[in-house]
Amino acid sequence: MSHMFWNCRGVGNRRTVREVRALVKAHSPRLVFLAETRQPSVKVEGLRWKLGLRGFCGVDADCRGGGLALFWDESLTVTIL
């Protein structure tokens, strides 16, 4: 099982989204964690379809930064504490 963790420093631009998609395509992780998304979780949630990972949990960014996103494959059972 592979996992991907990345401090992406923003997923609001197309280049970063392309890079995330390329990494997921190349390595086929079953779980992807993105830190510093700098976006509301509603916007980041749309990435799950582009990544092919159906599970999602996100934390909104505040006005100065932050934001977390966790995506996972349907075959995993994930419990958020």
Image (spheres, rainbow, N blue to C red):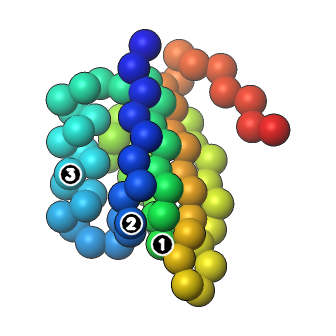
Quick check: 46 above or below 56? below
Q: Residues within 10 Å of mark 2 (few under 14, many from 20)?
A: some
Mark 2–mark 3 Cα distance, whole angstroms, equals 12 Å
Mark 2–mark 1 Cα distance, whole angstroms, equals 7 Å
State which quarter of the image contains the N terminus: top left
Q: Earlier in the sequence, mark 2 or mark 1?
A: 2
* Residue plotted at (56% across, 65% down): 67
Indicate which disc residue 38 carries: 1
Dot 2: element: loop
The residue tagged 2 is 9
Q: Earlier in the sequence, mark 3 or mark 1?
A: 3
- Residue 66 visible (yes or no): yes
Dot 3: element: helix
Q: Position of residue 15 (x, y in %)?
A: 18, 64
Q: Residues within 10 Å of mark 3 (few under 14, many from 20)?
A: few
Indicate which disc residue 19 carries: 3
- Say which amino acid is labelled 2: Arg
Left or right: 14 as drawn, with respect to 62: left
